[in-house]
């Protein structure tokens, strides 16, 4: 079994940037590092990415075990099926979040054996000392996964961190509600600190936390500036690479290593721009990855796009940062409060923009901004069947976009004050598969769809040229 | 006059009839018939002819299977879950787990002394059933009967990643074009099916002895793959298609004997041997 | 007396078949109808604002034909059906949509609902995931935001006295629902599961005063029933999320069992818990909707001790109902793509196992066609527990 799976593992995917190619070993180190840390007696926490409290874990020397990451690795190594099957045998429906199913299948197996399952990817996922559920407004599985895992690890305690943010409403401003949101989030984060203090027997060093939050904020700004470089034509880095560079962003926030990584990436991108070195030699189509988590087992699809002259200078997925200086953060030295404001600021970042265009909505505004800033020719999304969190609302967002990017010529007022006719048609493609469940993926079918989409892009390009 | 008990198991593709007194005195397997009009009565007639009995000689008749509802010539309807449990225990008294692989559904049943204690069933998706094999056999241009033998000749089963029948069919055709040997492909397909069935069955507390029934039990390659996946030796009855009908007949016998023992009237329906209409 | 010549049951039947008929009439009379999804919307606040709350229902007999143009098929099939009917104009008498943070399928489609339906008013209620001091305070504030927002829409300042009055009316409604449930304790029950499902579903479509009148009429008739309309049969509890149709319960009863109690949204989960009276009304509402409604979407802190104790704390209400109504078996009925319930299936099964209560787990897709295909499993389950 294991032998067959190894054969299925693919050759290393070609990345455009050197920085991205250094990520593989980094992820491997996370996973083997947690096993080592466990042996050294450090405290391990199961936790979720985009959790708001990365720096708190860091300041308490708690080693995060990113369970979504491990499931993703199983998927990328095309070795998730046996864990999914285990979960299914436990009466979990195969229609549920496959990250969670993979993790639950793995945990059940590990607990049954009392050791890692045979040939566990990269040595396997270490047993945690405690688990941090995330009661966010997004993602039900984050609230249910660890509770379900407790069936196999009844001795491992859970702390569920409530982290809501307000949804966009026409008649309510963020300012109207932010006080009680912040109050609640702060209370939850302080509760987390208390829980961690109990679990580790250590006191929180708030000065250290303050330094890490500082570092985190500087990293946010740096990432934003770095990613913004991708506006260049030809773009020096695509979404395929961003699915690697998300690792220091979402797994290592508030560490010097993450900051240094983006310094390096920033420099590499500037060098490439200076040399006019793009992801592809002849950049024909600039695409926006407009939603959906990628199929981790099929990242080579990005290379397939590249082979047709299509690049992705920007994506909404795993761009979990905005420039801190634009978040309207109040002046406070309390690192917990800063984390709370950063959280709220991030999720409501596009609300003001939406208010200015009646009938619009923040997610749509974000797409529009990216389309304009990055000179986008088409939008690609992925609908992963097992994840409602990131994959509901995408069709509707595309429908909204079509109201602006119409397939007919429209009159645009140019900067010179003169009206000119322009075709703003923006083709879109929705791929359908899953994050790690390869049984729903058909390479033939996917590539046929990509081919047809490229043909559409070409047709639109010709039409636009004719108009000019 | 001795009592005769009949069981009729109307499956999606095959109708099975068994007539028993102390042992099996006749058993017939025939096609269920064209869509909507199930010719189960013909199979019943054949079984009666084989036994040399008139229909009136049957003391009690139990219908089971997908088409059990509205059988005009049955005294009682019982699901195939209970009937398989009873029937398999007749052949294998020590059986604890049954896996039945039919044309349109597959199921797992745990039993205790011939009574079901728990069960799981898949009938929503072709991928875990005999239908999956039909589709694939057709795509490969071979007969379904050949699949089992071909798979046993393979040393290196191909990895089939797609679960969906339609995708799997595409995948198989593509792999064939890549030059993957046919035996390996067939073995891969059977492994894929076995894996699907085993993870459904694993929702139960599987225990020895494990008995496989239904059309799938006739496929030696599938039986082997399933044994491997489950990690249990498996047994197959001499005629794996009739265990449901045998169980139905035996359940009828129990009902009659219980009524006699307690001197209660036997609840019987007015029955006539005619065609069944199933929508 | 039987169902056919009972005037009140034929009224229930009419309201069930033409769901929303009263709300439509009230709309014609000039009332404002506030549509909502899920048991987590405090209808007391809507009533206190002088508006008519109306719970959106799906329809298992109606294929999804239009909703998919705007809503992904990976959403909860029940929500998809609700959305499809709304898009098709079945509920065009509604002036608004209120959606709570029940699950991802509701939350992540809020924008899709509000823009697609283009209603004059919409609101999202952010329900926290934990039950604690801070979360309760947060939720009270969130309900205050809703109260104010709804008040602006209704041009009415909603006073505490309005809320208190509404709370009384709804508590009365829950008393009556409880009395109806009590009729199911006898063997055979005085009311079938199918009838009960109709009554409870209809209750969600009426202003609370009308629901109270209707329930009172039903109670009066049923308590005069000399003999049960149904035979003695295995007593079944249905556990799961939202069942807003009779098809599933009817299938169980047609298979030779009586559904005597449930743990469902349109059932005991929502109809039994009272709102506390005497204190601040919003505080009390927050407590009811966050703490007293026992839905898997809300995390309940693990009770110290064994995993078994934790299960008892999480699912104890199901076990108590099972004992109180003397059930012989439980059918756990969960929709495909339902993460909140789906991740609890093994735990719920383990809990029921620990009570030696036989359980059948069924996954389904919210359509009459797929419900019909569950017949064999239900019959086999009844044979197993016999």
Image: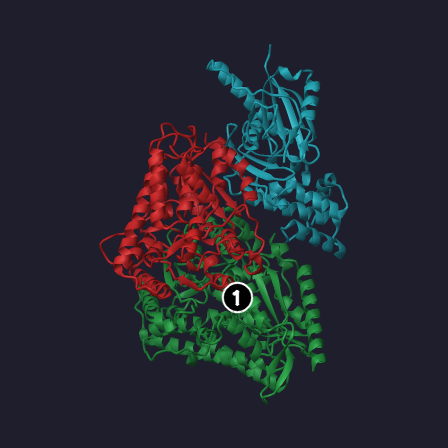
| Residue, far left | C278
The chain letter corresponding to cyan is B
Residue name at image x 49 percent, y 18 percent: B258
Q: Which chain is red?
A: C
* Label 1: element kind: helix
Closest to the observer, A432 or A421: A421
In the shown orientation, is residue A320 left or right of residue A76?
A: left
In the rendered structure, the answer to whether residue A429 lies left or right of residue C18 reads right
**Circle 1 chain:** A
Q: Is residue A354 visible?
A: yes
Which of the 4 quarters of the picture holds residue C257?
Answer: top left
- Residue A299 position, x and y percent, is 61, 66
Residue in front for this viewpoint, A403 or B236:
A403
Relative to residue A339, is residue C223 depicted above or below?
Answer: above
In the rendered image of this protein, which colour is used for chain A?
green
Residue A267 versus residue C290 in the image, above or below = below
Residue C202 position in % (x across, y down): 42, 45
Residue that label 1 marks: A28
Q: Quadrant of residue A434?
A: bottom right
Q: Quadrant of residue A254?
A: bottom left
The one nearer the camera, A419 or A338, is A419
């Amino acid at each position: 079994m294991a032998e067959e799976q190894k054969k299925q593992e693919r050759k290393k995917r070609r990345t455009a940037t050197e920085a991205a190619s250094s990520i593989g070993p980094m992820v491997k180190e996370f996973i083997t590092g947690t096993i080592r840390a466990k042996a050294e007696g450090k405290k391990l926490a199961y936790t979720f990415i985009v959790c708001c409290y990365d720096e708190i874990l860091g300041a308490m020397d708690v080693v995060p075990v990113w369970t979504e990451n491990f499931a993703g690795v199983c998927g990328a190594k095309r070795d998730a099926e046996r864990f999914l099957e285990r979960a299914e045998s436990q009466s979990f429906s195969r229609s549920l979040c496959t990250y969670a199913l993979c993790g639950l299948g793995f945990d059940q197996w590990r607990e049954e054996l009392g050791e890692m399952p045979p040939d566990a990817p990269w040595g396997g996922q270490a047993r945690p000392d405690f688990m941090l559920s995330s009661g966010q407004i997004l993602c039900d599985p984050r609230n249910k996964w660890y509770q379900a895992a407790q069936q196999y690890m009844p001795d491992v305690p859970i702390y569920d961190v409530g982290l809501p943010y307000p949804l966009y409403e026409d008649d309510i401003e963020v300012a109207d509600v932010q006080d009680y949101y912040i109050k609640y989030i702060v209370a939850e984060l302080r509760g987390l600190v208390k829980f961690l203090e109990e679990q580790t027997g250590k006191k929180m060093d708030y000065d250290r936390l303050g330094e890490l939050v500082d570092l985190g904020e500087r990293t946010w700004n740096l990432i934003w500036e770095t990613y913004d470089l991708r506006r260049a034509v030809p773009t020096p880095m695509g979404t395929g690479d961003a699915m690697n560079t998300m690792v220091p962003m979402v797994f290592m926030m508030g560490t010097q290593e993450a900051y240094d990584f983006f310094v390096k990436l920033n420099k590499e991108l500037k060098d490439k721009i200076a040399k006019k070195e793009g992801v592809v030699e002849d950049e024909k189509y600039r695409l926006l990855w407009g939603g959906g988590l990628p199929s981790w087992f099929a990242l080579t699809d990005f290379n397939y796009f590249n082979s047709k002259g299509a690049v992705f200078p920007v994506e909404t997925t795993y761009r979990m940062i905005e420039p801190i200086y634009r978040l309207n953060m109040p002046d406070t030295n309390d690192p917990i409060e800063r984390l709370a404001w950063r959280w709220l600021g991030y999720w409501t970042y596009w609300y003001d923009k939406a208010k200015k265009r009646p009938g619009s909505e923040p997610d749509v505004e974000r797409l529009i901004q990216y389309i304009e800033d990055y000179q986008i020719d088409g939008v690609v999304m992925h609908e992963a069947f097992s994840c409602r969190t990131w994959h509901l609302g995408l069709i509707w967002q595309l429908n909204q976009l079509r109201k602006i990017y119409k397939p007919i010529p429209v009159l645009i007022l140019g900067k010179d004050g003169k009206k000119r006719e322009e075709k703003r048609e923006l083709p879109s493609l929705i791929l359908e598969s899953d994050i790690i469940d390869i049984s729903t993926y058909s390479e033939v079918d996917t590539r046929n769809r990509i081919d047809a989409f490229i043909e559409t892009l070409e047709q639109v390009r010709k039409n636009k040229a004719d108009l000019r | 006059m001795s009592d005769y008990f009949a069981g009729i198991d109307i499956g999606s593709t095959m109708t099975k009839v068994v007539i028993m007194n102390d042992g099996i005195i006749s058993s017939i397997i025939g096609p269920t018939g064209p869509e909507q009009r199930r010719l189960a009565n013909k199979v019943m007639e054949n079984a009666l002819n084989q036994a040399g009995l008139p229909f009136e000689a049957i003391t009690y008749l139990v219908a089971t299977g997908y088409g059990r509802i509205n059988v005009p010539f049955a005294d009682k309807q019982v699901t195939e879950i209970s009937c398989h449990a009873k029937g398999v225990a007749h052949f294998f008294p020590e059986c604890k787990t049954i896996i039945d692989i039919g044309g349109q559904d597959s199921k797992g049943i745990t039993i205790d002394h011939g009574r079901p204690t728990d069960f799981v069933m898949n009938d929503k998706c072709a991928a875990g059933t005999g239908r999956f094999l039909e589709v694939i056999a057709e795509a490969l241009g071979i007969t379904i009967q050949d699949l089992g033998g071909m798979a046993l000749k393979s040393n290196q089963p191909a990895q089939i990643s797609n679960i969906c029948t339609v995708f799997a069919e595409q995948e198989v055709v593509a792999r064939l074009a890549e030059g993957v040997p046919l035996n390996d492909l067939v073995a891969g397909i059977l492994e894929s099916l076995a894996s699907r069935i085993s993870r459904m069955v694993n929702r139960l507390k599987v225990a020895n002895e494990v008995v496989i029934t239904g059309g799938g039990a006739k496929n030696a390659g599938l039986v082997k793959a399933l044994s491997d996946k489950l990690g249990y030796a498996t047994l197959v009855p001499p005629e794996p298609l009739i265990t449901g009908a045998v169980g139905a007949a035996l359940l009828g016998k129990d009902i009659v004997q219980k009524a006699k023992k307690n001197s209660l009237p036997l609840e019987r329906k007015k029955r006539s041997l005619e065609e069944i209409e199933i929508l | 007396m039987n169902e056919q010549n009972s005037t009140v049951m034929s009224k229930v039947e009419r309201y069930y078949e033409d769901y929303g008929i009263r709300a439509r009439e009230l709309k014609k009379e000039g009332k404002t109808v506030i549509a909502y999804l899920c048991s987590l919307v405090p209808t007391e606040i809507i009533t206190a604002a002088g508006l008519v709350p109306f719970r959106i229902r799906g329809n298992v007999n109606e294929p999804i034909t239009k909703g998919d143009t705007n809503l992904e098929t990976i959403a909860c099939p029940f929500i998809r059906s609700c959305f499809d009917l709304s898009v098709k104009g079945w509920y065009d008498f509604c002036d608004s949509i209120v959606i709570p943070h029940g699950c991802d399928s509701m939350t992540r489609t809020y924008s899709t609902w509000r823009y697609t339906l283009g209603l004059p008013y919409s609101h999202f209620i952010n329900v926290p995931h934990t039950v604690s001091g801070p979360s309760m305070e947060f939720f009270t504030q969130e309900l205050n935001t809703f109260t104010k927002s709804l008040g602006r829409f209704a041009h009415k300042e909603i006073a505490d006295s309005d809320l208190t009055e509404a709370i009384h009316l709804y508590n009365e409604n829950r008393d009556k629902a409880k009395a109806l449930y009590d009729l199911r304790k006898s063997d055979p029950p005085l009311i079938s599961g199918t009838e009960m499902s109709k009554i409870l579903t209809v209750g969600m479509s009426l202003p609370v005063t009308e629901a109270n009148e209707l329930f009172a009429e039903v109670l009066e008739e049923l308590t005069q029933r000399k003999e049960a309309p149904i035979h003695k049969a295995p007593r079944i509890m249905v556990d799961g999320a939202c069942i807003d149709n009779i098809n599933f319960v009817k299938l169980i009863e047609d298979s030779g069992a009586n559904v005597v109690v449930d743990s469902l949204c349109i059932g005991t989960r929502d109809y039994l818990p009272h709102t506390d009276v005497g204190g601040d009304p919003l505080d009390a509402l927050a407590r009811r909707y966050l703490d007293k409604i026992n839905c898997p979407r809300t995390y309940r802190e693990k009770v110290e001790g064994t995993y078994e104790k934790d299960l008892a704390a999480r699912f104890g209400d199901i076990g108590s109902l099972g004992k109180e109504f003397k059930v012989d078996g439980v059918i756990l009925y969960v929709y495909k793509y339902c993460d909140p319930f789906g991740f609890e299936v093994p735990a719920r099964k383990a809990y029921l196992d620990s009570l030696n209560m036989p359980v059948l787990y069924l996954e389904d897709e919210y359509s009459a066609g797929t419900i019909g295909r569950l017949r064999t499993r239900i019959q086999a389950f009844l044979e197993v527990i016999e």
